[in-house]
Amino acid sequence: MEALFAISLGMLTASGVYLLLRARIFPVVLGLTLISYAVNLFLFAMGRLRTGVAPVLGKSAGHGDPLPQALVLTAIVIGFAMTAFVVVLALRGLGELRSDQVDGKRSER
Amino acid sequence: MMLALLVALPFLGICLPLLAARHGRSPCAAAAALAPLLGLILLFFLGPPVFAGATLKSGSPWLPELGLSLSLRLDGLGFLFALLILGIGILVILYARYYLADHEPMGRFFAFLLLFMGAMLGLVLSENLLLMLMFWELTSLASFLLIGFWHHRSDARRGARMALVVTGGGGLALLAGVLLIGHIVGSFELSEVLVAGEAIRAHALYPAALMLVLLGVFSKSAQFPLHFWLAQAMAAPTPVSAYLHSATMVKAGVFLLARLYPALSGSDWWFYPVSLSGLATLLLGALTALFQHDLKGLLAYSTISHLGLITLLFGLDSDLANVAALFHVINHATFKASLFMAAGIIDHETGSRDMRRINGMWKYMPHTATLAMVASAAMAGVPLLNGFLSKEMFFSEILQQNLLGSFHWLLPVAATIAGVFSVAYSLRFIHGVFFNGEPGDLPRPDPHEPPHYMRIPVEVLVFLCLLVGILPDWSVGPLLAVAASASLGGELPAYSLAIWHGFNLPLAMSAVALSGGVLVHVLRQPLLRWYEGLPDLDAQALFRGGIGVLVDFSRGLTGVLENGSLQRYLALLLGSVLVLAVFALAPLAEVDGPVALGPVDGIGTLVLGALALTGLFGAAFHRNHLAALLVISGSGLLVALVFARFSAPDLALTQLAVEMVTIVLLLLALFFLPERSPPESDSLRLLRDLLLAAASGILVALLVYAVLTRPYESIAAFFLENSLTGGGGANVVNVILVDFRGFDTLGEISVLAIAAVGVSALLHGLHLPHPPVDRERPRSADHHPLILRQLARALLPMAMLLSAFLFLRGHNLPGGGFIAGLVTAVALILQCIALGLSWAGARLRFSFHAMAAAGLLLAALTGLGSWAFGRPFLTSAFGHFSLPLIGDFELATAMLFDLGVYLVVVGAALSILCGIGHVGRDAPRGEVS
């Protein structure tokens, strides 16, 4: 399962990096989103992948590591805030530069 | 304590002249002089124990881990310099009162001057070497500000910049040297460094430390080859030149030589660089001074030459030479400061500093002329003046040395030649300015004596020259003795400050210097012509050329790295991260670790496979923005499933809710952005990106696999054990968030609120045109579909109920403030989408910003509340309660904190989304509005 998880994360990262390097703003935002998924999963996996051991006391015999989960929970929410900021920055750029090219270049459109 | 006050006084006094400036020039100067006057009085009160041989110390730790402490010391050496700084400082303030013109910002000038004074006092009174270094850099800064005081003049700006670059660069070298000394000794306290001379000299790092320290010293005291900045610094107002660039700041370097003398001197490593650099500076300065036409230029090069003399004396490495050096520090400060002031008066009265035009001033200002002549005579080393005494000591010391072996005659000969030049330029100063015919065409044709008070500082200093010159033992003897013994750190050698030592070789050298100087002056015209014929070696141009090459180089480098393309930056960044990561992981011999893999099951395989595929599809079809968004939202939902599968219910819920909000956000953005990306033509770039992406993916996969197959230790047990007893909750993740790591969470919700504010600021005043409607896929005419509208209205109460439920149970079961907040946000946004912003806005009558701020405040206040019970910040308390229908549940103060989290999440999410929704609102009604 760990191998599968690793491959899946690798593909997610690769897709995210590829999108990050695009020239238009929207794919870049999507790339950031994908990378943040990968990073969140990576951090989460530092507590190891175990099934049926939710860190809620009294509900199961064993308990997974709650600490990475707590860290990732806030990371997800902050990730949203960051995405929102980037999106709004892009909109502002669109408004000022009339272009959705990442370097602000006017396209031939 | 008194010492700290002494150093603090000028800093405290900085604001006084600024405040008093509006009341006129005299009150301003008086306000500026207050702090140094008090300081001088304080210094005299501290004097008796110092003269009895004691070293006063005081201090408190600052950053003990780094060896930095706020410790000060006052011994004889510090006393001598503090006296010079405060005494000459007061005279300079009085002088500047009359020197500066009406329209010039005098308050600012005095504020800079006091800043310098405080820094310089701190420098000479520091016990801690790092503290001293801080003051050292502060003097460079103050000097920069003062040289550039006439900032409308380009030569002032250039001179200021050059001085800052040279002395600041030297300061960096000194920092490295001091750190090495601290490393060798194990302490930065002077009292420990000064007794560790043996250990320092025996250490392998001694040459490196010494060279770095000397680099700092030479840059500050304008020693060859770093002497050129001082001449350019003459663009400063003359009071600054008199104070900083002759009497005090340039002495900081030689002060350091005196201060660290016991620790660093006594080896060839000390003797050769210090004495040879001093000798070169002495000769070069004296020779160049002779050919200056600018009054201040002559004085500047003469200052360089005298500083070289002092450095040479320290380099001779004998106790007597040390005494002579300190004696010359005092003498030079008095006669050179008075000469600068006299030059300033002449400049002030004639409007020119060119000695080819200023002649015959004796007629117009006999009083000033007399003063300047006495001071020049002191500079030339005429008997009965202070300069004569220290020059005699210099000559006799230079005859004593035998360090150059069979070349031992070289130093005395060179010293005599320098003496000849020094007499010659002093003569040129007197003869050229005050006699030598009638004045040329002067900018101010009618020169006369300056205001009486402007002459007083010169009179005082010239009186001191005479006093020391005639009654040395009586006037300066005790001060010199106590300063020299502090510098030497031991017994004083036997010396005598008498005027008459009988007919001896030093006296003969003096006589040669005097007569040779007269001869050179008589022959000045052919000499000047010869000098004019020399190739022009302008240090300023060389320096600027060097700086220009540096700037060009860095500009070229920046151009290559930073061409304005985000894609290039990201590619470079990712490339370097990859290289660094591979380097860091290179020691990892094997990817596979000892821990056995978990079993592969169907659901897990399906979810993870789908996750990978959605990612790939999103990347592959990114040019169709909407399709890519939908596919990638699928990834988000699958991530939630992964969390759910691997025992993280809280994360699954959060991810699910965030995903919905994110989809709305991205859809909103897509409304304004083009629907498609045009194809990218450059296949080479495509290849680069694919390679980078593949490499990153492989690296991450290997890294994850390597980590997951290795054993791990966690501090999880602590949280699991203490969650119920300490935090009163069974949901450990939530307890960590609101209790154990509550402070982190407070920080995180602050970030969220700040992001919301940032988004509002970015959106402020932004109006985006609606994109043209695509012919092939027209937008729906029905802005608020009926079914969605009805469903949304019905969903709201249920969603709110769910949100409340998730919130209340959050402490014990998956849920909590973050998740409940997101659910509420989703429900409210659904209303906005289905029913329109104006409809929703009419019903949600509160500001989302206020909501986020209130949440932040609530969370912070909950944290502060525990102070009222004498507990640390964010300690929680809890108890059990029971409600009908819901049953037994706990109420903890952590819940109040969680409520704060909830409010921030709702407020931030809604303010961001509604903000974007409003952007297109004034345009024709679209998808959202």
Image (cartoon, coloured by chain):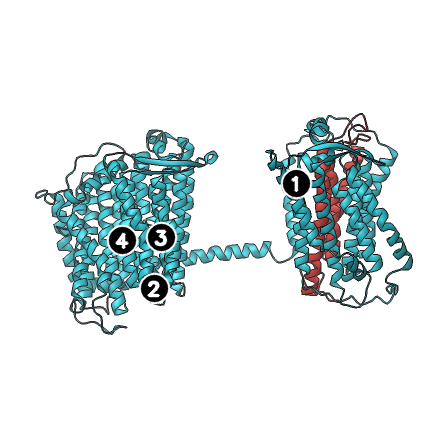
Chain colours: A red, B cyan
Q: Which circle marks residue B24 in the picture?
A: 2
| Residue that carries the numbered disc 4 in the rendered image | B303
> x%, y% of residue B269?
33, 37
Taking the image as shown, residue B308 lies to the left or right of residue A21, namely left
Three-letter code, disc 1? Thr
Three-letter code, disc 3? Leu
| Disc 3 from disc 2: Cα separation | 18 Å
Displayed quadrant of residue B75: top left
What chain does mark 2 sit on?
A: B
| Disc 1 from disc 2: Cα separation | 54 Å
- Do discs 4 and 3 belong to a common subunit? yes
- Do discs 1 and 3 belong to a common subunit? yes
- In this rendering, which labeled residue sits more in front, label 1 or label 2? 1
Quadrant in which the N terminus of chain B is drawn? top left
| Residue that carries the numbered disc 3 in the rendered image | B114
Three-letter code, disc 4? Thr
